[in-house]
Amino acid sequence: MNNKTGAIITCCLLTSFLLSAEALAENAARDFQSELVTKTTFIAFDVETTGLSPKKDRVVELGLVKFKNGRIKEKRCWLINPDRPIPVYATKVHGITDEMVADKPRFEDICSDLMAFIGDDILIAHNARFDVNFVSAEIKRMKGTLPDNEVLDSLKLFRAWFPELDSHKLSIVAKHVGSRKGTFHRALDDSIFLKNIFKNAINKQVTPLIVYDLFELNGGSIMFKDIEIVPLVASLN
């Protein structure tokens, strides 16, 4: 066998390998979408912030609940030093004060733990674009790499599952399904409320849902993306 023939064979084998790898990846994605919701691990998460703009405001609390078939597997919650005073109007919403976060880690200090916790699981948040944008902005400030997890918006899901309600605020839907233990507008408790509502809705489905069904109801997935930010101008320290 001459060098030219050997090179052609090697090229064909490499092409075959790459095509096989691509096919396996596509099949894995299809298998994931076809998983039963009750067999899939999800992570409900929530952020509390200094305001409404991810460009200039900061995260002061991040809570996550990892669950499968309604059962909590793990929980995480961090109070986070935002490097700026928390406005009074924000404190009136979530109750978090400057004193509570003064000695807490900054977002960059907890980011690696956050990434390890979420892995490649599907995330869920209520009015998810708000939470996703804030996390994206924090990661951009530290020049980190955005996660590629897919995110579901529970607001859209709850509108589909509870059409009898006039409002689908988390507190209203939680009370509707009998989930009352906890404090609204705190990151971990809101994540648990979300998990409880999600479990209630899934248990009432006549036909078992697969992951694909959730993304259909959601109109696709929400992804973390690059966010324009405003440089810091104040600090707590």
Image (cartoon, grey):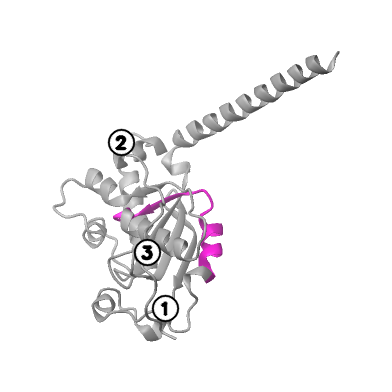
* Residue 157 part of the magenta-drawn span: no
Name the kind of residue labelled 3 in the image. Answer: Ile
Question: Mark 3 sits on what residue?
Answer: 229
Decide: is 201 above or below 216: below
Could you tell which of marks 1 and 3 lies nearer the N-terminus? 1
Secondary structure beneath label 1: loop
Estimate how packed mark 1 is, as few (under 14), some (14 to 19) or many (20 or more) residues with alpha carbons within 10 Å. many
Which residue is found at the position 21% from the left and 60% from the top?
A: 172
Secondary structure beneath label 2: loop
In this view, the residue in front, 150 or 157, is 150
Question: Mark 1 sits on what residue?
Answer: 83
Locate residue 208 relative to residue 8 in the image: left or right.
left
Which residue is found at the position 77% from the left and 20% from the top?
A: 7
Q: Give the residues drawn in magenta, as a range.
A: 109-128
Name the kind of residue labelled 2 in the image. Answer: Val
Q: Which residue lies furthest to the left in this view?
A: 166
In this view, the residue in front, 194 or 69, is 194
Q: How far apart are marks 1 and 2 (CA)?
A: 49 Å
Q: How far apart are marks 3 and 2 (CA)?
A: 45 Å
Can you tell which quarter of the image residue 193 is in? bottom left
Name the kind of residue labelled 1 in the image. Answer: Asp
Could you tell which of marks 1 and 2 lies nearer the N-terminus? 1
Which residue is found at the position 47% from the left and 69% from the top?
A: 107
Residue 136 in percent (x, y) is at 42, 58
One can see residue 210 in this view: no
Q: How far apart are marks 1 and 3 (CA)?
A: 15 Å
Residue 133 in percent (x, y) is at 36, 58
Estimate how packed mark 2 is, as few (under 14), some (14 to 19) or many (20 or more) residues with alpha carbons within 10 Å. few
In this view, the residue in front, 218 or 21, is 21
Question: Mark 2 sits on what residue?
Answer: 206
